[in-house]
Image (cartoon, rainbow, N blue to C red):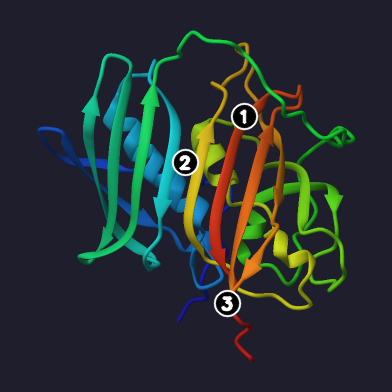
Amino acid sequence: MAEASPPAFGDFDADTAVALERESGAERMFSAAVSPNWRAGRGPHGGYLAAMLLRALIETVEEPARAPRSLTIHYPSAPEPGPIAITTRIERAGRSLSSLSARMEQDGRLTALALSAFSVPWAGPEISELEMPPVAPPELPFWPGQPPHPLLPPIAARTVKQARFGGAPFSGGEDPMEIGGWLGHDEPRALDALSLAFFSDAQIPAPFMRLTEPNAAPTIDLNVHFRAALPLDGKPLQICLNEVRTRVIHEGFFEEDGLMWAPDGTLLAQSRQLAILLPPPSS
């Protein structure tokens, strides 16, 4: 038997592609394929599946002026590599805002359930009490990056990271459960809402700063708020500053709050997820 080829990199768009199979009223059925190249621990990476779901939702809206504003996903079970079906539904389309749902199923089994909101811009005050952390700019050239930590899953190779603050993973110290740094795809690619959905779950889990050995950390639910339209001022971005923090781990569950920034300090997205720390296989 021939040896398996190594994972191909730079295929984010190919591996999140969806194809419209059927349309009936407010519903659309898409086919897609879960790639084995985006595995994280015991199943596909949650941010990878989020990007695939968001792509189907964007194609359902079919109105560029209505940008994604919110995406909430629950992950009841992990799909296996292979064909998958995504059913989207426009629950309501108003004059300015559309509310949609999406179901991802494999062999009749629910693997992800999503709700989303798309809207045109609204007039209103521009106020923000958030500021990007004062960090050193990215080191150039950004690509190729450093190899990921050897104890991290293969999904870590699908991004390029330059750490700027936070402790060392699996050091078992008393540092805060937070980490931040510059983040991009594993090859140059203009950032868009699909990238931000993926990046919302792409940083090293913040609780790893307190652990001494790797744990699987599957996502239970993920919420992303998109706070800026891309590209900014017509200039495509390829990297962002990503920071995540955890404050509580209880009964195995932990929350993780994330912020994503453009290099000029523009807030691109906010995220929050609930995840669970599974014990190492040897325990």
Residue neighbourhood size for the residue with mark 3, other residues' Cα within 10 Å, grouped as few (<14), some (14–19), many (≥20): some
* Amino acid on which the number 2 mark rests in the picture: Asp
Q: Residue tagged by mark 3? A: 278
Q: Secondary structure at mark 2?
A: helix
Q: Residue at x 37, y 31 (%)?
A: 117
**Which residue extends farthest top?**
123
| Marks 3 and 1, the one that precedes in the sequence | 1
The reply, left or right, for residue 18 in relation to residue 266 is left
Rendering coords of residue 141 (x, y %): 82, 36
Q: Residue tagged by mark 2? A: 13
Q: How far apart are labels 3 and 2 at the CA level? A: 30 Å
Q: Secondary structure at mark 1?
A: strand
Residue toward you, 213 or 83: 213
* Amino acid on which the number 1 mark rests in the picture: Leu
Residue neighbourhood size for the residue with mark 2, other residues' Cα within 10 Å, grouped as few (<14), some (14–19), many (≥20): some
* Amino acid on which the number 3 mark rests in the picture: Leu
**Which residue extends farthest right?**
136
Quarter of the picture containing the C terminus is bottom right
| Marks 3 and 2, the one that precedes in the sequence | 2
Q: Residue at x 52, y 35 (%)?
A: 225
| Marks 1 and 2, the one that precedes in the sequence | 2
Quarter of the picture containing the N terminus is bottom left
Residue neighbourhood size for the residue with mark 1, other residues' Cα within 10 Å, grouped as few (<14), some (14–19), many (≥20): many
The answer to whether 198 is drawn above or below residue 116 in the figure is below
The residue mark sitting in front, 1 or 2, is 1
Rendering coords of residue 282 (x, y %): 64, 91
